[in-house]
Image (cartoon, helix red, strand yellow):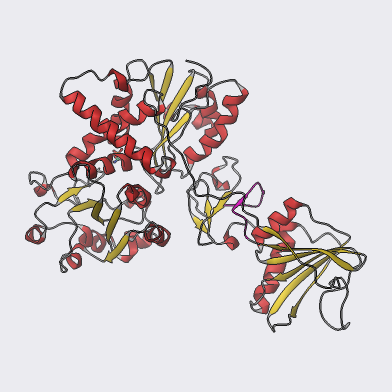
Amino acid sequence: MEKVLKDTFLSRSLTVINDLSIDEQLFLYNQTRRLKEKWFNKEDVSEFMIKGNVGIYIVFIEPSTRTKESFINAAKFHKNAKVTIFDSNLSSFNKNESYVDTFNMLTGYSDYSIFIVRTKLEGTCKLLEKSVSDFAVRNNLIVPSFINAGDGKHEHPTQELLDEFTFLEKNNFDNSYIHIALVGDLLHGRTVHSKVNGLKIFKNVKVDLIAPQEILMPKHYIEKMKSNGFEVRIFESIEKYLKQKDIANIWYFTRLQLERMGEDILEKEFFLRKSVTFKKEFLPLLPQDVKFYHPLPRHKIYPTIPTFLDSLPLNGWEKQAINGYWTRIILLSMFGGALKYNSNNNTDICNNEEYIISAPVINGTKGVQKDGKRGIKPIENGTVIDHIAKGKGADEIFLTILKIRKIMKFFDIDSADGIFKSEDGKLKGYISLPDKYLSKREIKKLSAISPNITVNIIKNSRVTEKYRIKLPPKVYGFEELKCKNENCISNPIHGENVKGSFIRNNNGELICEYCETPHDYNEIWDI
Ligand code: CP
């Protein structure tokens, strides 16, 4: 295989479903449909097979039946590929080797590698995608591809591919509309979290969430569905859902993820289960063409889809599980270079946006007190940080000043701070730093600690420059950043030596780049 390959999917990763554009996802579904047709018509399917020295590494550090085994079989469809099943129990993970070091090593064993990775830790593939590429470049290797086979309660993008393909099959590949009910543990279920973006392949989407409050989908996912244009309705139980008439013809069940629940939720297990388990008496209330789906496994004693339903026409979950094999063959065909598609892989992140905005200097007197009684402590030269937490209460302003001082390490330099009333009557804080000018990096840091402040540059007792600073589109590269999610690979408790990194969304929340947990700007600093 050539060292540098200009190909749409080579070296691409699937860490979350959004890593493939909607057009690319539809391409995958069309190719899966073609492959299935050709296979069942006994036609030649060699066009789908990977050529060249491609290593497919299957790395499961959490139990799995379907995802692991369907990937092993899908990888073996690609007869030229070298398939390795990594034994994490007998690996140097047990000698405290980091994820990055481990995958760096494995990258060296083929011209090009595709890693299929399942972990408890959230954001692992995102970390590997970012970090292992450096190793590949240093060693003149093709940057490998990482496929997230499920990470904690975060996402399960390849399950999403097989789910959406299955829904399309049910709809005769008409993607104009879907009405789907998501039932069960919507709090911990990563497969339903992937639906928030995966369902965007349909032009019109109506989603009914059926779960008690304790295991309802996290608010940020619900908000995201709404901002994606989905109609969203919420019901506490199947019983309550069936009391109204507008019932979905696609039901997607999930099991209660007891292994991820805290004691407080576990105590209510019986009640939670009852709310989301289907009962015989509900059958007459269902639409004629309804199909039930489930990512599986089902609980053997308390399945949310009881086994008496297995032989009914509404059983869609068996064909759904089998589709995992076909969709994963095609995903490997794409990432292994056998299928090409010209696409724009657009992201909606605007990293070049201005967040340090130059403001007019009105009379240049900010460095001195106007009336000698109140206002900013006069300095001849240096920086005055102004408008800190403007409009908040005195306590909050004081705490924000302390936070800025602590994170910016302003304790050990000549400085002063205070709280005073601005002309519009609102309280605000300031810090003045005689003889200190901030670097762009320091101003950037400041903007993520306390956005909407102003930075005044004082020279010879006059304000010569003034900047208003906003929350930046991306916050990264500072030691003190920390994701609040304890299951995130970037959280320091896991010792993977990953610095926190956050991307601002349209609502002004900072989203962890690894596990996608949303944060207020106050929550990203480990102080
Ligand atoms: N659906 C799914 O991910 O199943 P496994 O955990 O068995 O892989």
Q: Position of residue 106 (x, y in %)?
A: 50, 23
The answer to whether residue 267 is seen in the rendering is no
Residue positioned 9% across, 49% down in the render: 308
Q: Position of residue 264 (x, y in %)?
A: 37, 62
Q: Position of residue 275 (x, y in %)?
A: 22, 62
Relative to 428, is 245 on the left or the right? Answer: left
Relative to 4, is 431 on the left or the right? Answer: right
Relative to 237, is 100 on the left or the right? Answer: right
For the stretch drawn in magenta, the main secondary structure is loop
Report the label total: 0
Residue positioned 49% across, 18% down in the render: 109
Query: Relative to the observer, which residue lies in front, 287 or 216?
Result: 287
Tell me, yes or no, whether the highlighted magenta stretch contains residue 94.
no
* Location of residue 81 (image quadrant): top left
The answer to whether residue 81 is seen in the rendering is yes
* Ligand 1 quarter of the rendering: top left
Residue positioned 28% across, 65% down in the render: 233
Depicted 479 relative to depicted 98: above or below: below
Q: Position of residue 129 (x, y in %)?
A: 51, 35
Residue positioned 35% across, 31% down in the render: 331
Depicted 102 relative to depicted 200: above or below: above
The stretch in magenta equals: 471-482
Q: The C terminus is located in which quarter?
A: bottom right
Tell me, yes or no, whether the highlighted magenta stretch contains residue 480.
yes
Depicted 310 relative to depicted 365: above or below: above
Relative to 112, is 298 on the left or the right? Answer: left
Query: Relative to the observer, which residue lies in front, 81 or 338?
Result: 338
